[in-house]
Image (cartoon, helix red, strand yellow):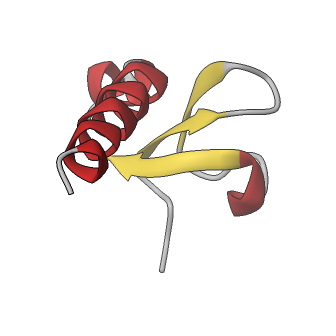
Amino acid sequence: MSDEGKWFFCLKHQRVEHGPGCPDRDRMGPYASEEEAAHALQRAAERNEQWRRQDDDF
């Protein structure tokens, strides 16, 4: 799979990357846009909170 044209959020450097960059183990994605990649950590936190709430309901 080619990373060309795809966006990622690098966890090591705390920044958005476009195309090939840091190893996959150090980044989240791919995302369709730079904006989506820039909000990767926020979105992950929101999902984690949602899943935690669902677990609390059981």
Place of residue 49 in the rendered image (x, y in percent of width and height, measured from the top left):
34, 31
Relative to 44, 24 lies left or right: right
> In this view of the protein, can residue 35 be seen by the observer?
yes
Q: Give the residue at x 68% y 60%.
A: 24
Place of residue 39 in the rendered image (x, y in percent of width and height, measured from the top left):
37, 20
Place of residue 4 in the rendered image (x, y in percent of width and height, measured from the top left):
46, 57
Give the mark count. 0
Q: On screen, 11 above or below 51?
A: above
Relative to 8, 54 lies left or right: left
Quarter of the picture containing the C terminus is: bottom left
Q: On screen, 17 above or below 54?
A: above
Place of residue 32 in the rendered image (x, y in percent of width and height, measured from the top left):
24, 44
Q: Give the residue at x 75% y 59%.
A: 25
Q: Give the residue at x 48% y 80%.
A: 1
Q: Residue furthest bottom?
A: 1
The residue lying toward the viewer, choosing from 47 and 51, is: 51
Relative to 51, 8 lies left or right: right
The residue lying toward the viewer, choosing from 26 and 33, is: 26
The residue lying toward the viewer, choosing from 7 and 56, is: 56
Q: Kindly indicate the quadrant of the structure image that contains residue 10.
A: top right
Q: Kindly indicate the quadrant of the structure image that contains residue 38.
A: top left
Q: On screen, 38 above or below 48?
A: above
> In this view of the protein, can residue 6 be seen by the observer?
no
Q: Give the residue at x 70% y 19%.
A: 14
